[in-house]
Image (cartoon, rainbow, N blue to C red):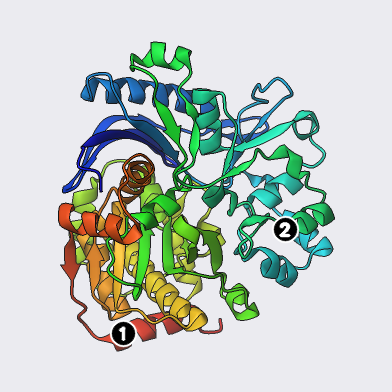
Amino acid sequence: MSTVTRSYAAVDLGASSGRVMVGRVGPDTLELTEAHRFPNRPVRVPEGLRWDVLGLYAGVLDGLRAAGALGAGRLDSVGIDGWAVDYGLLDADGALLGNPVHYRDARTEGVAEKVWATVPAPELYAATGLQYAPFNTLYQLAAARDSAQLAQARRLLLIPDLMSYWLTGVQGTELTNASTTQLIDPRTRTWSADLAQRLGVDLELFAPLRQPGDPAGLLRPEVLEETGLAGPVPVTAVGSHDTASAVAAVPAAGERFAYICTGTWSLAGLELTAPVLTEDSRAANFTNELGLDGTVRYLRNIMGLWLLQECVRAWGGPGLDGLLREAAAAPALRSVVDAGDAAFLAPGHMPERIAEACRASGQPVPRNPGETTRCILDSLALAHRRAVEDAQRLADHPVDVVHVVGGGARNALLCQLTADACGLPVVAGPAEAAALGNVLVQARAHGPAGDRGALRDLLVRTQPLTRYTPGGDPGRWREAQARLTAPR
């Protein structure tokens, strides 16, 4: 680890907001300060649901200006992470062809079955190791096959890579995010040319692959002028899939751990050295996404705190703290729903959909927001339990502890319920895992800051962590699970 303390800007783009954080990294220093936060509001237009990507970029520029103000106009590097699967299309001049389509848009409904008619689902999984999700980039491209935009496109950039291109003028495709397209072979860690050819995907659309830690260009003079930063400022490729950055910031010792990255989604699984491509793994809907230093993020996507976010939006008035107090006082495991059910994917009317799922499974319908909140948190803890148990079995990789990172690490009730459900201790924190992982990869590229073990040791020494001990009756969780799997 370098003896110098340096400053790095982490641009962290989420599904509902973006922020720019400044990380100061030294031998015994890892400090994170929020420079700027901005909303990420999708827009529904006549042709469907779209991202306001220009608004996002404006937020990034504002954030870099604020980050520079915190560091007297100097930054040692900038890194960008964000959500997966979505992309922008560029024409031959490098100009954006319309606003990127939102992954919750309805255009991919029924598309997977058309893809499977050419490459059956088991064969597709054996080639890419990616779980089925209706919004995977592959299905988005299949849905867009006959569109005028795709016909005109000469380049496809995933969202973090698009932001990096606008900042630097350099195009690239960062590997951890590329692995979510369902076009990467996780064994070779490069494009599956045979699969792309069979499905009619032109891999020339993609910019060259780059790894976390690779240089991604310098801020353009126009960006330096607009942000007030003193150049040169390098942009560094990080784990640009936010989950890859978050897993890099799991404060684990050794290999016997599971992680749950909590936020809009819950990503629950293991860090492995090789993918698990068995048919049992496909049937359990586990994904093999690529991580830092040749690792594989073997995990299951769970709907996550999206369920609660949508309920809070529908209710309007109640604050989260009050809802959590009411949920803690509500009866435990009275009703649970399948937190991975695609029925909860679309926005709108979430309290009614949860009530209907309880009714359809013969369980009591929550009577008020507190009971609905308790239903959601019990259901998420139950989904975490299933994912952790299934991952250990399918990968033959036992664990002794579960690390909860991301925004859900602040939710003490969810963390305790997860410990109770899994029957394992839970270590909660850091809450800002994606931004910290982003910063640490930059620090290692410019530091050096040591190997993955050294990065995690620095996290343990510098970040506040909370430990939850499992309690309660494990049989109640098994009974709750049985309610979801019982024939109707």
In the displayed structure, does residue 467 sit left or right of residue 74? left
On the image, the x and y values in percent for residue 304 come to: 41, 58
In the displayed structure, does residue 391 sit left or right of residue 68? right
Give the residue drawn at x 34%, y 76%: 256
In the displayed structure, does residue 126 sit left or right of residue 53? right
Give the residue drawn at x 78%, y 43%: 202
For residue 384, the mark is none
For residue 476, the mark is 1
Residue 480 versus residue 233: which sits nearer the camera? 233
Q: Earlier in the sequence, mark 2 or mark 1?
A: 2
Quadrant occupied by the C terminus: bottom right
Q: Provide the secondary structure element on which disc 2 rests.
A: helix
Residue at numbered disc 2? 112
Tell me if label 2 and label 1 are in contact, CB under 8 Å. no
Type of amino acid under label 1: Arg
On the image, the x and y values in percent for residue 6 come to: 25, 35
On the image, the x and y values in percent for residue 225 come to: 40, 11
Type of amino acid under label 2: Ala
Residue 362 versus residue 407: which sits nearer the camera? 407
For the residues labelled 2 and 1, the Cα–Cα distance comes to 37 Å
On the question of residue 367 being in view, the answer is no
Q: Nearer the viewer, mark 2 or mark 1?
A: 2
Residue 383 versus residue 23: which sits nearer the camera? 23
- Using the rendered view, name the quadrant where residue 14 is placed: top left
Give the residue drawn at x 54%, y 48%: 177
Q: Provide the secondary structure element on which disc 1 rests.
A: helix
Label 2 crowd (10 A; few <14 / some 14-19 / many >=20): many
Label 1 crowd (10 A; few <14 / some 14-19 / many >=20): few
On the image, the x and y values in percent for residue 471 come to: 20, 80
